[in-house]
Amino acid sequence: MFTKRQGIFVWVKNIKNGRKLRRFGHIITMSKKQRYVLLYVNQEDTEDKLQQLQKLPFVIKAEPSYKPFIRTEFENEKAKEIKEEESKYGF
């Protein structure tokens, strides 16, 4: 239903050149101070886009975002310990 997307951080020599990156994906943000561009691309095209971006003369570095691979479901450790203690005593 939804296509899986992944971000790519691209550091550029000049932020004006960042506008040329529109053809590679959707530009989410451009930082003038830190000179980087955040692009979103389809997850299956990420490796191809990274190789293409690194070949451009105005790109310093391009690296993928690892956000889709990070676990975002957290459980409180104390709550886990309380559940274990309650199960021991039959509560």
Image: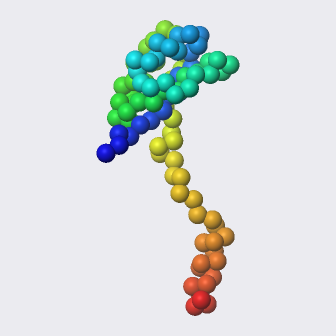
Left or right: residue 2 versus residue 64 is left
Residue 23 at x, y percent in the picture: 40, 17
Furthest residue toward left:
1
Left or right: residue 35 versus residue 59 is right
Determine the residue positioned at 63% across, 65% down.
76
Residue 2 sits in which quadrant?
top left
Residue 31 sits in which quadrant?
top right
Left or right: residue 86 versus residue 5 is right
Using the image, determine if residue 20 lies above or below residue 51: above
Residue 82 at x, y percent in the picture: 64, 77
Using the image, determine if residue 16 lies above or below residue 7: above
Furthest residue toward bottom:
90
Residue 57 at x, y percent in the picture: 49, 8
Residue 4 at x, y percent in the picture: 38, 40
Using the image, determine if residue 9 lies above or below residue 73: above
- Please name whichever residue, 23 or 75, is drawn nearer the observer in this view of the structure: 23
How many numbered circles are shown?
0
Name the quarter where the C terminus is drawn. bottom right
Using the image, determine if residue 74 lies above or below residue 18: below
Name the quarter where the N terminus is drawn. top left
- Please name whichever residue, 52 or 28, is drawn nearer the observer in this view of the structure: 28
Q: How is the image coloured?
A: rainbow
